[in-house]
Amino acid sequence: MNAKQRIEELTKQLNHYNYRYYVDHVSEVSDQEFDRLMRELQELEAKNPELAMPNSPTQRVGSDLQQEFKHVRHNIPMLSLSNAYSVDELLTWYDSVKAVYGKDVAIAYEPKYDGLSISLIYRFGKLAQAVTRGDGVQGDDVTENVKMIERVPLYIDQPDIKAQSRFEIRGEVLMPFKTFAKLNAEREANGEEPFANPRNAAAGTLKSTRSSVVRERGLDVYLYEVPLRFTSKEWEQDQCDLMNNLWRFGVPTAQSFHVGYYNNAIVDCFDKERIEYVINDFVLRRPLMDYPIDGIVFKVADRHIRSQCGATYKAPKWAIAYKFNAERMITTVRDVTFQVGRTGQVTPVVHFDPVPLAGTLVRKATGNNADFLHEMHIAIGGRIEVEKGGEIIPKIVVGVDPCATKDFKEVTYPKYCPECGAPLVKDGSNYYCIGESCPAQLQARLEHFVSREAMNIQGIGPKMIEEWINDGIVKDVADIYESEKLETFFSTRIILSRTESKSVPAHRVLFALGIRYVGASTAKLLLKRYGSINMLAVIATACPDQLLQIDGVGVDTTISLGRWFSDKENLELLKRLQTAGLQMDEEIPVPTASSNGGESQPLAGLTIVISGVFEEHSRDEYRAMIEQYGGKNGSSVSKNTDYVLAGSNMGPAKREKAEQLGIEIIDEAQFLRLIQNS
């Protein structure tokens, strides 16, 4: 793979991870892996600046902006932090800082909380606005939600702050471990999908459209930074003094310490021995903390000299975050079961002796596929090493050869579906159930459909769905809206939530359908481009190559969409959902060559008149395709008409007029080739 191809691949991959993390609140890779890929991209772009892509993630801060909230521009950009994963990297950073000042400088350190960044703005002591980091330049206004957080001071009764027309303090919104455990227990009891981790729970709660949810879920906040202004008081000079004083004023600040502090005096000793002591101290205290902590932030303690260090496009040079390595534990495999997903994929689940990781007790992890089981030497009675990837998802990182264990049992993939008995077929490294009426697939599809990220129908849980399937009263997702028998199971809460689901945006409806390879971000990309699920169906079956021109859509996704929309039963399901009132259209800007990444519009400037009856698509679908590809629909044949798209039984008057004016008449096949060859 050459440099250009690798830059394109890394850009696409990192943008996907950024979107999943900041918008979907899902971490698909560890921070360390993300940073490794980012550094590789930075190095490649440095060597080949002419190959850097316009949407390169190296040129921007990840964004959590959402359309539901008003966007507010930050007075001073909210940047992220550069990461370090070793003491040597920290020492290299300190050498660069020392080079700026020409001498040793005092360094402060504090916990790196794993939550959602927030900026609180006070005017004459009163809380006026609360804004998320967003993309670093602007963020979401979540003032009313933040006011529901009990520890956020609505008023700071301190003379210096009350005298200022603007006092800003930044920090992190968090969910305590105890609150997180209680919330997930309640969600599971109500049949709702649990949150993956405290950060996701905090982010999802803070971005709720109902402020009451924030109060109910018990969010907390720790604040740790005041952007430097042109004038400031003496008590704001040193980072630790600033945090301690704000704490006295009733502001919930982070504990901040000097790296060197002996006999009540600050000592400049940012050396290996002292740093290792600080890190080890945090590692020992971390399991006792009530909040998710994923590292330590080191920063120049003297706030008034920080500006001399400067900043990159996304991070200040006067601070750095040391990230903890993921906790790992060795345990013994007790069983391997096989789980059938909504697409029929059969995935092994490895069960092992419980081990404590990142604040939770972990009992199982995915075995991925047959190749993974073999490569990791997974066997009953064998030993494995487990960690939480990105502090979120338990995963097996090392398998210990079972031959070193006395009693072990080799794990083999089943030949038949463990749920319905249908044969399994191998596709690459994965096995799939081909049973058309597999209850496990239906169970997974229904659970996915009602989940928070999809239709968000609250109150419908796995046990309830299992009961429906066993009783034979539900056969597909449309039954949730149509079946009279299900009404007896529905509480008022479910009925209200089901009604609200009819307002869910079309891209989430597409995601809810559970089409293979179409995740939440891909669904958003597709509907941003085509604006309608019905339009997407036309493109996926008539002009599939067009899908490949969308950054983020690959061959597997294109094939999967084509197969799904070619199935008559799926199309019938789509019609039933549309009749039930679900959103099939999404408002998007009218596509142009510039908005489509420079793609040519084959029908741009052309007026086309449709006449007759068609076999491949309806007249309405062809009208939509004409507009989609830059053309204009004509109502009658005139000298301004460029083409007449003719089906069978074309009107004789239109044909005669077209022939008189010398206007070309094309059939369906010619029209579709015209689009496909663009």
Image: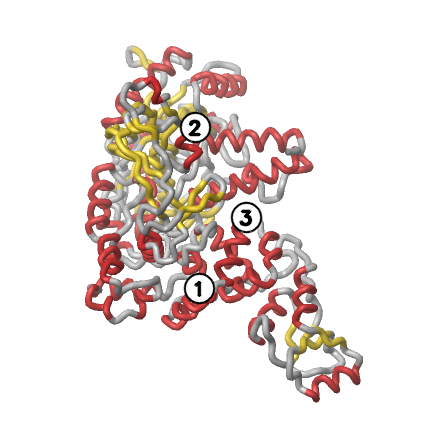
Residue 448 position in % (x across, y down) = 35, 53
Which image quadrant is residue 339 in?
A: top left
Instruction: Tell me if 218 is positioned left or right of 416 in this view.
Output: left
Taking the spot 55% from the left edge, 53% from the top edge, the residue there is 558
**In the depicted structure, whether residue 263 falls above or below residue 25:** above
* Mark 1, residue position: 570
Disc tally is 3
Amino acid at dot 1: Asn
Q: Which of 429 and 605 is in front in this view?
A: 429
Q: Nearer the viewer, residue 107 or 533?
A: 533
Q: Which of 25 and 437 is in front in this view?
A: 437
Residue 417 position in % (x across, y down) = 35, 47
Determine crowd level at label 3: few under 14, some 14-19, many 20+ residues with C-alpha closer than 10 A.
some
Query: CA separation, marks 2 and 1?
Result: 38 Å
Determine crowd level at label 1: few under 14, some 14-19, many 20+ residues with C-alpha closer than 10 A.
some
Instruction: Tell me if 147 is positioned left or right of 413 in this view.
Output: left
Query: CA separation, marks 1 and 3?
Result: 24 Å
Disc ID at residue 375: 2
Q: Considering the numbered disc 1 on the image, is that residue within a helix, a strand or a loop?
A: helix
Amino acid at dot 2: Glu
Question: Which residue reaches farthest bottom?
Answer: 653
Amino acid at dot 3: Gly
Picture quarter with the N terminus: top right
Q: Which of 38 and 275 is in front in this view?
A: 38
* Mark 3, residue position: 552
Looking at the image, is mark 1 or mark 3 earlier in the sequence?
A: 3
Whether residue 136 is visible? no
Whether residue 226 is visible? yes
Taking the spot 59% from the left edge, 74% from the top edge, the residue there is 615
Determine crowd level at label 2: few under 14, some 14-19, many 20+ residues with C-alpha closer than 10 A.
few
